[in-house]
Image (cartoon, coloured by chain):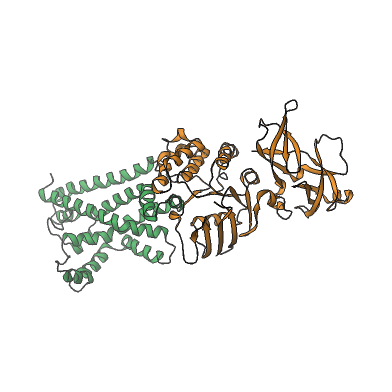
Chain colours: A green, B orange
Amino acid sequence: MLTDSDLQALWLTVRLAAIVTFILLLIGTPIAWWLARTKCWWKGPIGAIVALPLVLPPSVLGFYLLLAMGPSGPVGQLTEALNIAPLAFTFWGLVLASVFYSLPFMVQPLQTAFEAIGERPLEVAATLRASPLDAFFTVAVPLAKPGFITASILTFAHTVGEFGVVLMIGGNIPGVTRVASVQIYDYVEALNYSQAHRLALVLLVFSFVVLLAIYAGRRFRPARGV
Amino acid sequence: MSDLDIQARFQLAWPGFALDVDLELPGRGVTALFGVSGSGKTTLLRCIAGLERAPQGRLVVDGDIWQSDQQWLPTHKRPLGYVFQEASLFSHLSVQDNLHYGLRRSRRSSHTSLDQAIELLGIGHLLTRNPDLLSGGERQRVAIARALAVSPRLLLMDEPLAALDLQRKREIFPYLERLHRELDIPVLYVTHSPEELTRLADHLVVMENGRAIASGNLGETLSRLDLPIQLGEDAGVIIEATIGAVDNEWHLARVDFAGGSLWAKDQGLAPGTSVRVRVLARDVSLAEQQTASSIQNQMPGQIDAIGEDEHPGLALVRVRIGDTILLARLTKRAIATLDVDPGKTFWVQIKSVALLQ
């Protein structure tokens, strides 16, 4: 059976993924909206930066974030100026790193969904007296709902599967930064294969269910659009 | 509203297209913006709605400045209604919620205006439906009602029938005609269809290459010799008239207009009803004398002017009957043989007329 420390690691993983998904919904939505609608030349560079975590080795991202959170890094100096503890090797440091790491998984599906809506429904809303912000919440968001669901599930799942960044930023502190993927690594290191199996199976089933939810949802969703 | 109270001046240059118009439009009735694709009529409409921003422009509607060098009113603050070419209903809302979307956000509107719009467009039975399950014609009727529900001071319609097949067009036409008759909202109506133009418009703006090449009363503008070429086979005039009498024996109606009268097929309209009569240039011919002919509508008319037509062998002739102008499409050889010249009088034979209500 799963041990207490396994359950602790799973609970930590779920908490991390949920918080990161929530934060990315807040940050990623305006970025995706801007990327979907801007004609400004910054679109290319910003889009590339957002997509960077897709191709960058997690250890590289983790390394830079570790430096940034260190005493001489910008994040480290900020936390010092605000008189709070350094973020490295803490849960909130892990949250910050995961936000960067999972950013493209939130932004890209949302951007695609917003682009698919097109200009017309927003123009219609404007002719019906809706301000741009009003039209965003009452027209764009409801029409992009499938995109929000996909983006949230992908972000959550991707954060659950994170490993390299966690090792770099969070280390391996039980109950604080030891997430499920690190726990499995520990079992394997200790040659405790049977325990590694159990936890790995939980993650495997979880991942499959997530993808099944997305693909099944896509298949049966009626055609949308205005 | 007074008679001339939409002033619109826009200059805008895009790669391969420039809009340059300076118009004064009536604040009542239906003004058609007519022209071929790419002539700038939709762009002009979008500039008026504020969906497109012309860098140089001035737009005053009924005394209120919507755009000037110092001012720019965003679309959502302009008291207008807009009907797009495709119905563009919000697919995440029911028909009812689509209709309420603008209503809730508009200070001017009331439930009366919505109820009136629902009744006018005949969509009461569709309210609980999902827009995706409506036919094209039903969808466009809902879109028109949605635009009317906000009690707009100006209704903009961008080829509302163009995306529909002939049958759906016929389905919507009566509603548009009712709108024209029963509502006191000025309408700008973009179209490239001579049919819609002649049936719905009171005022005509002809667009070509981003410019307004003519603007005026429909009847007068249609009888200009330099414009009807654009209408091709549909070149002709519109005459405002009233039903004078009905001949029940032959099922004909006498239509009286300024300067004469015509017989047309009786369509069950009572004497005294105002009608629009469309007389196409190709149905009008000239003769030196009154002849015994199957063409029953014959009357003397004076040649006013002769102009070029789309084909080098054809000419358009303006003929004056009392205060009314008709156009006749004749071959140049006929003009030479009959010696048609401005000032001379001929018998005008009208082969067929269409009554539009």
Looking at the image, residue B248 sits to the left or right of residue B289; the answer is left
Q: Quadrant of the C terminus of chain B?
A: top right
Name which quarter of the figure residue A28 lies in: bottom left
Looking at the image, residue B95 sits to the left or right of residue B228; the answer is left
Q: How many marks on residues?
A: 0
Name which quarter of the figure residue B177 lies in: top right
Residue B46, percent from left and from top: 52, 55
| B300 or B356: nearer the viewer | B300
Q: Would you place residue B24 above or below residue B298 in this image?
A: below
Residue A88, percent from left and from top: 17, 65
Residue A102, percent from left and from top: 28, 57
Residue A98, percent from left and from top: 24, 59
Looking at the image, residue B100 sits to the left or right of residue B6; the answer is left
**Residue at far top of view:** B249
Q: Residue at x 78, y 48 (%)?
A: B320
Q: Would you place residue A97 above or below residue B275 in this image?
A: below
**Residue at far left of view:** A4
Kindly tell me whether residue B237 is visible in this rendering: yes
Kindly tell me whether residue A223 is visible in this rendering: no
Q: Would you place residue A106 above or below residue B15 in this image?
A: above
| B206 or B7: nearer the viewer | B7
Q: Would you place residue B293 above or below residue B309 in this image?
A: above
| B307 or B333: nearer the viewer | B307
Q: Residue at x 65, y 38 (%)?
A: B274
Name which quarter of the figure residue A73 lies in: bottom left
Looking at the image, residue B43 sits to the left or right of residue A197; the answer is right
**Residue at far bottom of view:** A72
| B342 or B95: nearer the viewer | B342
